[in-house]
Amino acid sequence: MPPPESFSGASSGAGSATPTLAGPPTTVPPADTAALAGAEGAATAGERAQRLGWGAKLAIGWLVLVVAAALLAPVLPLDDPYEPVGAIARQGPGTDGHVLGGDSLGRDLLSRLVWGARMSLLISVTSVLLGMVLGGLLGLLAGYFRGRLDKAFVGVFDVLLSFPQLILALTLVTVYATGEGVSSTRRITVLIFALGVVSIPVLGRITRATTLTWSQRDFVHAARAMGARNRSIMFGEVLPNVLPAMFSIALLGIAVVIVAEGGLSLLGVGVQLPTPSWGNIIAEGRGSLRDAPHIVLAPTVAIFLTVLALNYLGDVVRARFDVRESAL
Amino acid sequence: MKAVARRLLHLLVVLFFVTLFVALLTSMLPGDPTDAIAGFASEEQKAELREDLGLDDPVWVQYGRWISGFVTGDLGGYYSVTGERPVMDRVREALPVSLQLMVEAQILALLIAIPLGVYSAYRAGSRFDRATSATLFGFLALPNFALALVLAYYVGVELGWLPVSGYVAPADDLLEHVRRMALPAISLAVGQIAVYMRLLRSDMIATLQEDFITMAKAKGIPPSHVLWRHALRPSSLTLLTVAGLNVGTLIGGAVIIEVIFSLPGMGTLLFEAIQARQYIALQSLVAIIAVGYVLINFLVDVLYAVLDPRIRHATA
């Protein structure tokens, strides 16, 4: 009985294959590492695994550096990110011992970048966590119980995905946190909430698809036969196997949210100045692009390296745990 | 036929929820919505506006009124001290600009991605393939707004090759149109190139393993003919679907790119509406974008089924 059931589950997934495939439009597309390894044979796969290790170490190194800087910002010997320090406005890297130079108001750019990392990471990590918990829960329930519940939750994901993601986040932030007297904390909370809502369907989908396949495995049937409760099967047997897939998508999700926060800042609904985030340093520096391009370049490079590292690690995790690309 | 009916039903349900969300945006505004919509107005004007917008009506009445306005092209107005101006007037001018930008970026991306993908798949594992893959993986990590700013600075300001702002309609001056659209379209296309190329490459690698390709090669057909005539078509289905569905990313990107390059499109309108806190305009703009996106997804979905006999028969 289980095999046909599993087949029907899979084919109903394939029926809606097109939206599934494009589910997360802003997510980085499936890497072809797995397909490539399959097509090329074992020798290259081994060689590739070695290369992965080297690249992955670099990626992890950079992320550790960024996270450490973000966490330690208050105790690092940095200038005040809010106060101008001497005549370094728009001055390039190296002026008066300021490693990255000054921003358009004469504040130390390195300090703003480090404090900006703190804000960008806070927003991206918490919103993806929110998406992971809510989307993951919905996806797990849908994939495990199937039937009507599954249909309903997939419907929720479909509706959420029927907005271009940036537009949805933009709309939520504009409605709930713009206007006079909106406090910085409120803006940040709404930002996290909006970007979290956007990540729910993306993480929900991958969790559901992966749960569908794992809950057909023999050990799950065995657990059920031994009389285990649904809840303990779901969280004890299925969830641990689904986590790697969620994790690989969450890494990509963090990258997407970092970029999205930048985009929202450029549209004037990101983190409010003077609090720095990578996005609003770029947005603020846009005005002095002509005479001080370094203000825009520094956070751009920071975003680029971080997103690159996250995308790369996401691929590594996916390749390691053989996450099905089509499940996206 | 049944499959088409099911998709249509799905489309209607999604459209309903999307428009419901948008229609109720104004009532979701925290506090008194009229304060946000027209903060400058007197108490009487606010009461009048409240009456006009029917903010005290039940949700269903509000939705009905909004949707009937929307489908007949009544998108509400901009509220300012000097009076009210229809949103539709602005949209009529802005929509073509955004569509041009997105179509041009899409064409540019496909023009570059298809040959790259085909050749990389043909020479999978070669130095060319690895270099292209690595470069494009890098491009994936470059946010389009960052690329836009970098291009605007280096190509626009430092080198002075291309203008960095403003719009010229293709009907007025085609060359000038291309010059002004070049940087925005490139900024928007680069991320897509990476997506498309990687997809096409992996599908193409799979196709090249198929028997009919070996057969074609055995018959002595030249490799380029095998690649372009025999292998590309069956490999491009996923690419086409994703190209269609990527419109969501494209819309989000275009909004920001338009603002950076001062193109008078939907993105710039949206930006202005946010800056001036014109919530009625925001509501209509978001509705147009979301409905357009849903319809495109639907068309791609149907098109995909038409193009691929396996899907057509599987769901029928």
Image: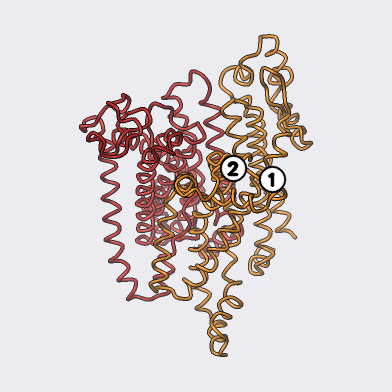
Chain colours: A red, B orange
| Residue A139 visible to an observer of this rendering | no
Residue A235 in sight in this render: yes
Whether discs 2 and 1 lie on one chain: the answer is no
Residue shown at 65% from the left, 44% from the top = B14
Say above or below: B157 vs A276: below
Closer to the camera: disc 2 or disc 1? 1
Q: Secondary structure at mark 2?
A: loop
In the image, residue B301 sits, relative to residue A76, either above or below, namely below
User: Residue B96 bears which disc, if any?
Assistant: 1
Secondary structure beneath dot 1 equals helix
Q: Give the residue type at disc 2.
A: Phe
Residue tagged by mark 2? Answer: A163
Q: Residues within 10 Å of mark 2 (few under 14, many from 20)?
A: many
Percent x, y of residue B172: 71, 48
Residue B165, percent across and down? 56, 41
Task: Measure how far apart labels 2 and 1 are at the Cα level.
Answer: 20 Å
Evaluate if marks 2 and 1 touch, with contact meaning CB atoms under 8 Å apart.
Answer: no
Whole-percent x, y for residue B257 in the image:
54, 43
The residue sitting at 46% across, 71% down in the picture is: B120
Give whichever of B174, A71 is nearer the camera.
B174
Occupied quadrant, residue A95? top left
